[in-house]
Image (cartoon, grey):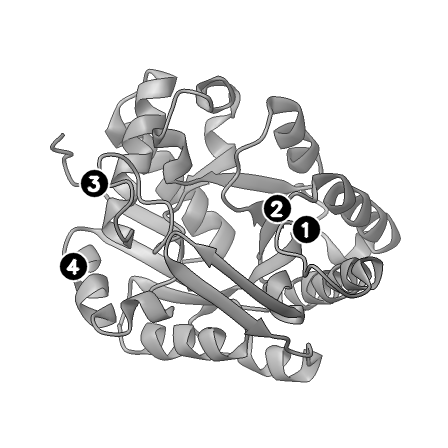
């Protein structure tokens, strides 16, 4: 399938991860040459710092998000599509991340959130979950203090995510936009219409990945999500869209996600490119 180039923004890319250590700049340049911008998203201090370093190398089109992913708060050994995940646990230091957030190319706090899928097999699981919640809300507070949107990861934890967000927002209403502007995004969304609207009602939008190209399971929610409530992303190097499934993903392939959404909605690719680019620009201020 040949897809015409329109302007796209990959709102969640990890070209700052090990999978791209040999050719990150080539991957970035290939995307930029094809009118695809990107936000490089950190998962702990090292990759957050690296995201900023890459973003600073380019005049425009490459931006950074900084934060601690919940699985980096404890020891984890796992594998995602051939990418080994071995974390030793990082203590969240608010002051360090607040300093990173002052860099000009930083446009978001993320990715942060809750992950109950990769919990360790031993230890006090309840305490680990509570720590995830505490650090997540500290980073939400940092985002609101710096007027930066928050990129939220949630895996097998939507009930707790909704509970803590509702409670935090109720207690800290002064931190959130009074005019209803979105203040964050649920990244890699693959839930129901009801779940999506619960997040919309909290002031969040959603973004779709290559998962939506694997089958027609997401078509129903895609058709019903309003045009101003979603963006597109790759989450590269993971979840390469069809027809590249199983290969290393990269920002340039975000247009295949957009093409699948256009098909499901019965709209042109140009229209999806237009609205998702606008939504990304407005949320991240780019």
Q: Tell me the mark number nearer the camera, choosing from 1 and 3.
A: 1
Label disc, if present, on residue 30 of the rendered structure: 4
**Residue 124 vertical position relative to residue 167 in the rendered view, above or below:** below
Quick one: label 3 or label 4, which is nearer the N terminus?
3
Q: Nearer the viewer, residue 242 or 39?
A: 242
Residue 103 placement (x, y as % from top left): 48, 78
Comparing 143 with 15, the one in front is: 15
Query: Few, some or many C-alpha atoms within 10 Å of disc 1 (few <14, some 14-19, many ≥20)?
Result: some
Whether residue 198 can be seen here: yes
Q: Secondary structure at mark 1?
A: loop
Which one is earlier in the sequence, the residue at label 2 or at label 1?
1
* Residue on which disc 1 sits: 116
- Quadrant for the C terminus, please: bottom left
- Mark 3 neighbour class, 10 Å CA radius: few under 14, some 14 to 19, many 20 or more: some
Q: Indicate which disc residue 155 carries.
A: 2
Percent across and percent down for residue 251 are 29, 53
- The residue under the point 37% across, 80% down is 53
């Amino acid at each position: 399938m040949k897809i015409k180039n329109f302007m796209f923004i990959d709102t969640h890319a990890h070209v700052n991860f090990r999978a791209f250590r040999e050719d990150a700049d080539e991957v970035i340049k290939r995307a930029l040459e094809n009118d695809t911008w990107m936000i490089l998203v950190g998962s702990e201090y090292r990759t957050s710092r690296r995201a900023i370093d890459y973003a600073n190398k380019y005049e425009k089109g490459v931006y950074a998000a900084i934060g601690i992913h919940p699985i980096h708060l404890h020891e984890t050994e796992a594998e995602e599509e051939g990418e080994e995940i071995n974390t030793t646990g990082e203590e969240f230091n608010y002051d360090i991340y607040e300093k990173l957030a002052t860099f000009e190319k930083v446009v978001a706090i993320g990715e942060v959130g809750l992950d109950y899928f990769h919990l360790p097999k031993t230890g006090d699981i309840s305490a680990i979950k509570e720590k995830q919640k505490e650090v997540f809300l500290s980073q939400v507070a940092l985002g609101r203090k710096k007027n930066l949107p928050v990129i939220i990861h949630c895996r097998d934890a939507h009930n707790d995510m909704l509970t803590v967000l509702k409670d935090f927002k109720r207690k800290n209403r002064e931190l959130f936009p009074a005019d209803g502007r979105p203040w964050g995004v649920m990244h890699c969304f693959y839930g129901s219409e009801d779940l999506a609207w619960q997040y919309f009602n909290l002031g969040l939008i959603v973004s779709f990945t290559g998962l939506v190209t694997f089958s027609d399971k997401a078509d129903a929610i895609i058709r019903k999500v309003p045009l101003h409530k979603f963006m597109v992303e790759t989450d590269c190097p993971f979840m390469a869209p069809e027809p590249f499934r199983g290969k290393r993903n990269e920002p340039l392939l975000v247009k295949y996600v957009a093409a699948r959404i256009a098909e499901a909605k019965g709209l042109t690719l140009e229209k999806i490119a237009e609205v998702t680019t606008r939504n990304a620009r407005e949320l991240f201020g780019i």
